[in-house]
Image (cartoon, rainbow, N blue to C red):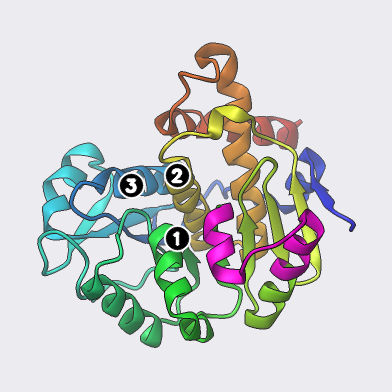
Amino acid sequence: MYFIPITKKEIQDRYQIVSAFAHKGTQGHALLIAGSYGKMGAAVLASKAAIKTGCGLVTAFVPECGYDILQIAIPEVMVITDVAQRHLSNVKFQIKPQAIGIGPGIGQEQETQKALHDFLVSNIIPLVLDADALNCVSRNKEWLHLLPSKTIVTPHPKELERLIGPWESEEEQFEKTIAFSKQYNLVVVMKGAPTHIIDGETVYKNTTGNAALATAGSGDVLTGMTTSLLAQGYEAVNAAILGVYLHGLTADIAITETGTQSFIASDIISNIGRAFLTLENDTNN
C-alpha cells in the first residue's frame, strides 16, 4: 500500500499565509461542543487549541456546570451553555460558525446521545467528530448517513474498531478504513504512531510526533486545532493534514525541554506558535 508522506514540503504546499489585512471576522468562527461534569478539561483544551491555531472567533458550547470554568480558563473564548447542568441535552445555538467540533468529554448519557442525533439531523456545517461523539455514533451506525460530506472523524484504535469492526492485520485495518471512508465520504484521521489520514483511496502518513503525545487530552487538542483550520477555510483533508502535522511538531519542538514523561496536552497548545513559525519563516525566506 502506498502512503503519501506528510513532509514539510507537503505542508508548505497547503499552508495559507494569513493576509496582512486580516481581522477576526475574516479568520473564521469555530464552535466546540464539548464537556460534561468532571470532564470540562476536554472543552478547555479543545477550545484553547482552536483559538491558538488562528481562528478569529471561538465559541464553546458546554453544560451549565462548565460556564465559570471556561470563562475563567480562557477569556478569549465565548461560551454558550446547554439547559442541562451536568451533560449535553439540547444542542441549540443562534451563532453561525464556519466549522464545528463535537465530542471531547461529552459522555454517553442517553440524553446526550439524543441531543447528538438531533444535532446531526439538522446540521450542514463542516464538522469534526471525535471521542464520545464517535462512540455514540458507533452505537447507532445509521447516524453515519447524517454526517456532512467530508466530515473529519478522529478515532484512536479502539474507537476505530467500534466503527469498522476488528481486523487481523495492519493491511486489513487499512482496507476496512478506506472502505469506511469511501462509503460515508469521510476524512478519517487514524490516530496512532504514526497517524494516518485517509481520504477515500488516498492515504497520508504523518512524519511528526513522538511518544510524548501519548498523554491525556492530546486528542482533545487535535480536535480543536483541526476544527480551527476547517473554520479558517481549509478543505477538510488539508485541515486534517495540517492539524496532525502541527500537533506532532509541537512535541518534537518541546521534547528537549519537557522530556517524554513530563509532556502534557497543555504543552501542545503552548508550542503551537513555535510550530507555525517553522512554516512561516521558511515561507518568508
Which type of secondary structure does the marked residue at label 1 adopt?
A: loop
- Give the magenta range: 157-177
Q: Amino acid at mark 2?
A: Val
Q: Which mark is residue 165?
A: none
Distance CA(mark 2)–CA(mark 1) = 18 Å
Which type of secondary structure does the marked residue at label 3 adopt?
A: helix
Looking at this rendering, what residue extends furthest in the top direction?
257
* Residue bearing the label numbered 1: 28
Residue at 84%, 52% (x, y): give it: 4
Which callout, 3 or 1, points at the residue further toward the start of the chain? Answer: 1
Q: Given contact means CB atoms under 8 Å apart, are the residues at marks 3 and 1 in contact? A: no
Q: Amino acid at mark 3?
A: Ala
Query: Is residue 217 placed above or below 16 in the rendered structure?
Result: above
Looking at this rendering, what residue extends furthest in the front direction?
168
Q: Given contact means CB atoms under 8 Å apart, are the residues at marks 2 and 3 in contact? A: no
Residue at 52%, 59% (x, y): give it: 159
Which callout, 2 or 3, points at the residue further toward the start of the chain? Answer: 3
Q: Which mark is residue 221?
A: 2
> Along the line of sight, which residue is nearer the eye, 44 or 183?
183
Left or right placement of residue 103 versus residue 275 in this view: left
The crowd level at tag 3 (other Cα within 10 Å; few <14, some 14-19, many 20+) is many
The crowd level at tag 1 (other Cα within 10 Å; few <14, some 14-19, many 20+) is many
Distance CA(mark 2)–CA(mark 3) = 8 Å
Query: Is residue 260 placed above or below 58 in the rendered structure?
Result: above
Residue 285 locus on image (x, y percent)? 76, 30
* Residue bearing the label numbered 3: 42
- Predominant SS along the magenta part: helix
- Residue 153 makes an appearance in the image: no
Q: Is residue 218 magenta?
A: no
